[in-house]
Image (cartoon, rainbow, N blue to C red):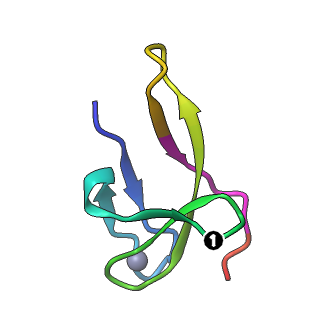
Amino acid sequence: MSETFVCRNQSCGTPWEQSEVVIKNEGQGPLFRCPLCGARNYLEVLEDEDGKVVYEQVDGKPFL
Ligand SMILES: [Zn+2]
């Protein structure tokens, strides 16, 4: 099952598959930048039942 992210920029709101974005860590935890508008979208790292790393989008961080 693939995770779908949605850009937090309200004027953008583009959905992305995980394979379509580059996930990196700039010191505040993992995030991806929306390929369309460049907004930072913060992620949480989780492990599934098989120990595989999965990313889940979080809403809590301030929009910079
Ligand atoms: Zn966007």
Residue 3, by quadrant, is top left
Work out which residue is located at the far top of the displayed protein and give it.
49
**46 within the magenta span:** no
Q: Is residue 36 left or right of residue 33?
A: left
Q: Residue 22: x and y, percent?
A: 37, 65
Q: Report the amino acid beneath label 1.
A: Glu
- For the point 70% across and 67% down, the residue is 27
Q: Is residue 61 left or right of residue 20?
A: right
Q: Residue 51: x and y, percent?
A: 49, 20
Nearest the viewer among 10 and 43 is 43
Q: Residue 21: x and y, percent?
A: 33, 64
Q: Answer above or below: position of 26 versus 37.
A: above
Q: Considering the numbered disc 1 on the image, is that residue within a helix, a strand or a loop? A: loop
Q: Ligand 1 is found in which quarter of the picture?
A: bottom left
Q: Quadrant of the N terminus?
A: top left
Q: Quadrant of the C terminus?
A: bottom right
Q: Is residue 25 left or right of residue 49?
A: right
**59 within the magenta span:** yes
Residue 52, by quadrant, is top left
How crowded pointer 1 is (Cα within 10 Å; few <14, some 14-19, many 20+) is rated as: few
- For the point 26% across and 61% down, the residue is 20
> Which residue position holds label 1?
26
- For the point 29% across and 38% down, the residue is 2
Q: Answer above or below: position of 28 versus 10.
A: above
Q: Residue 23: x and y, percent?
A: 45, 61
Nearest the viewer among 57 and 31 is 31
Magenta residues (range): 55-61
